[in-house]
Image: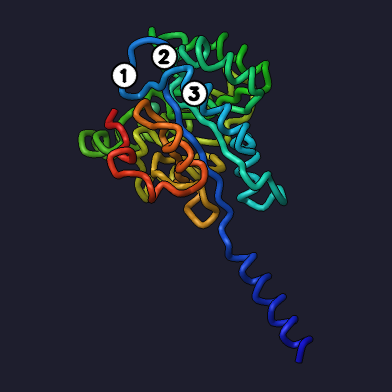
Amino acid sequence: MFRLILMVLVLVSSLLGAVTPKKVPVLCYHRFSIGELDSMSIKTHVFGEQMEWLKTNGYTVVSLDTAMQYEQGKIKSIPAKSVVITVDDGHKSVYSDMAPIVKKYKIPVTLFIYPSAISNAKYAMTWEQLRELETTKLFHVESHTYWHPNFKHEKKQLSAEEYAKSVDKQLNGSKKKLEEKMGHEIKYLAWVFGIYDDALLVDVKKAGYAAAFTIDRKHASSADNVMALGRYMVISKHTIKDFEHMVDGTEDRMIHSKKEVVKY
Ligand SMILES: [Zn+2]
């Protein structure tokens, strides 16, 4: 009888193990500032406090690639309290303000970049700066489309043919350009404005990406579509308590207005 119960327990736990999704919180930043804040910025010292909080509370910042390999079963385990840090758009404050803190804490950071802005837009980093950041082995560049289009608007405004051409440029073109410029494979994509649809989920897979990220506020989970994984956007109104709710998966306890993502 005892043996039977044991067998049943082993069976149930292994079944549970097989279906329990693997989840990792992925944070999404944009800009850093020591002065005036716009809606998408956080104060540089606040970012420093968040990194200190992670360290004090036993969190490990793992690279996006490590987290994805874990979720896809290629790595057996990662630290129980793991968190991933990503930054969208390639703003120059990543180089000037964020990088010193990243180097201080030696944390891996993924930069989702759209190539049209680099060495071009006033607010953006240069290719040289991106390459310099990658030499630290802490920063790693991935794709945020080619020029940051709004796919919802484009789908309405362009002919079917023009739209297909644009999608190809944004997904394949960006991957190719970034691979040329950075000299390594581009595996991941962040959806612009978090916008995607069923057709885009197929297109991004065809373009050869291994995973893609939204700004849906939830942990990136192996139970979700790998081309639409959640991320938590961190903005200036978030307190350290709000930050805690994001990384420990208790955002349901956060007041609603704190969860509203900025329309940008
Ligand atoms: Zn963006």
Report, in whole angstroms, how far the alpha carbon at label 2 lies from the one at label 1: 9 Å
- What amino acid does circle 1 point to? Asp
**Cβ atoms at labels 2 and 1 below 8 Å apart:** yes
Q: In what element is the residue under mark 2?
A: strand
Please name the residue shown 38% across and 50% down the image. 252
Residue 177 visible in the shown view: no
Instruction: Check the image and report above or below for 215 versus 73.
Output: above
122 on left or right of 181: left
Residue that mark 2 sits on: 33
Residue 172 image point, x, y percent: 48, 32
Residue that mark 3 sits on: 47
Please tell me which residue lies in front, 81 or 91: 81
- What amino acid does circle 2 point to? Ser
**Cβ atoms at labels 1 and 3 below 8 Å apart:** no
Residue neighbourhood size for the residue with mark 2, other residues' Cα within 10 Å, grouped as few (<14), some (14–19), many (≥20) = some
Residue 19, by quadrant, is bottom right
Q: Is mark 1 within 8 Å of ligand 1?
A: no
162 on left or right of 14: left
Please name the residue shown 48% across and 48% down the image. 249
Residue 243 image point, x, y percent: 46, 36
